[in-house]
Every structure is written in structure tokens, then in C-alpha cells.
Amino acid sequence: MDSELEINLRKLGFSVYEAKVYLTLLDLCNSTMKRLSEKAQIPYQKVYEVVKSLEDKGLVRVIEGRPKKVKLIDPSISLKVYKDKIVNELDYAIGNVISFWKEKRKGEVDRSLHIKGKKTVIRIIKEFAEKSNKMKVVWDNLPEWLIKVLKQYKGNLTLITSSNNLSLNNAEIKYTEHIKSKFIIFDDSVLVTFNDEDEIVVDSCRGCVLQAEEHFELLTYKSE
């Protein structure tokens, strides 16, 4: 039973020595430092440090005197207070991390552009293609308008597709099955993600482009 309780205490953030001392106090209720060291089987010079840590957690109380004693505070009260303290600290820490993430991403999110309409989408892709020197395209079965754009492209073109009947002399074509994503990366700096042929999201945030690059490399690795 003690081993199970020790595991539970470790899950609550107790160190090994803290768990041993606390379990001993559950049995003794109160104790001198020397007796606590002997019963918990931890070095005497460590007892004061461990007790101080448990006191800071609000789980025990030190009674001054000669000899100094340690008294267990009712676990049905102290552990609930301790739990609330942990939850509050976690909420605070998580809030700080999320705030940092949002602040870091604020400018990047502002660089996302949502575009609808097939004619507009085609025009945007043509403009990007005309201005770029490198394109990475991922698409299962390419529509005719995109094939035409790619055939006219003068830069470095890499295409990952499941269509094995394509003829693009200016492209490095890699074939793979079950492609679900549809996106184009222009000059490793602009990502265009297709929700459909008539709806795209244009991202210039570095994080978004890097994520797409990693996905592209993974598909390249899996392709023929």
C-alpha cells in the first residue's frame, strides 16, 4: 500500500524524499527530526530540507523546541489546498505560454489572406508563378488551368502528384498515392493552400511555410 501511495505522491509533484517523509508522518502524525529520519530511512542531514519543503507546500507544521518536532496537517484539508495551489500555478504558467505564443504569432497571422472565387484564384496563382523563381506543388489530380500554368513556368519546378499521365518537360515530377493536401510554395517564402479550386489561403508567415516545407519533404521521401 505504501508503494502505491508513494507513486500517488510522486504524481502530485513530491520528490522521493518528500514522499517518504510524508508517508512516515501519515503513520506517526508527529515526530522529532531524528525519529523521522530513522523511520523514513533518509539521511538525517536531509530531513530539515525536506521538512521545510513540505512546510512550504502547506502540508506539515514545524513545532519549535528541543527537540524540534514536525506535525502533519490534516491531509483532507491540506492536500485540497495544495491541489488548488498547483492548479493556480499551472493556470498561470499555461497562460504565460499561450500569451507568448499569441504575441509571437500576432504579426504572422496578420499576413494570412483568404481568397474566394475561381477566376481570382487562377489570377493570383498566375501572378505568383510569373514573379517566382521556384515552385513546389503538391496536388493529387491537377486541374487543366493549373497544368497550363505549370507548362508555361520558366523557373525551378518540383511537383508531387498522384497523376502518372502528366507531361511536363520543365518539372521534376514525383509520384505518390493518397495525397490529401493541395498547396504550392513559391520561392520558399509564400504558401498557397487550396481548400478547393475556387478557395485559397495565402500565408507568408515563416512558421506556416516551414511546416509546409516539412510536409513536402515527407511526401518527397515517400514518393517514387
Image (cartoon, rainbow, N blue to C red):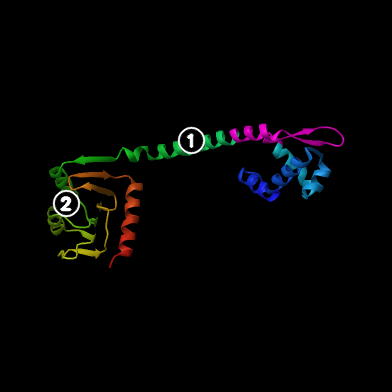
The residue lying toward the viewer, choosing from 185 and 41, is 41
Residue 182: within the magenta? no
The nearer-to-camera label among 2 and 1 is: 1
The x and y percentages for residue 133 are: 22, 55
Looking at the image, which residue sits at the far bottom?
224
Residue 203 sits in which quadrant?
A: top left
Q: Secondary structure at mark 2?
A: helix
What type is the residue that disc 1 sits on?
A: Gly
Where's the C terminus, which quadrant?
bottom left
Q: Is residue 88 left or right of residue 57?
A: left
**Is residue 13 visible to the viewer in this orientation of the structure?**
yes
The residue labelled by disc 2 is 130
Give the extent of the magenta segment: 55-84
Residue 76: within the magenta? yes
Q: What count of labels does the image hold?
A: 2
**Is residue 44 visible to the viewer in this orientation of the structure?**
no
The residue labelled by disc 1 is 95
Q: Is residue 76 above or below residue 216?
A: above
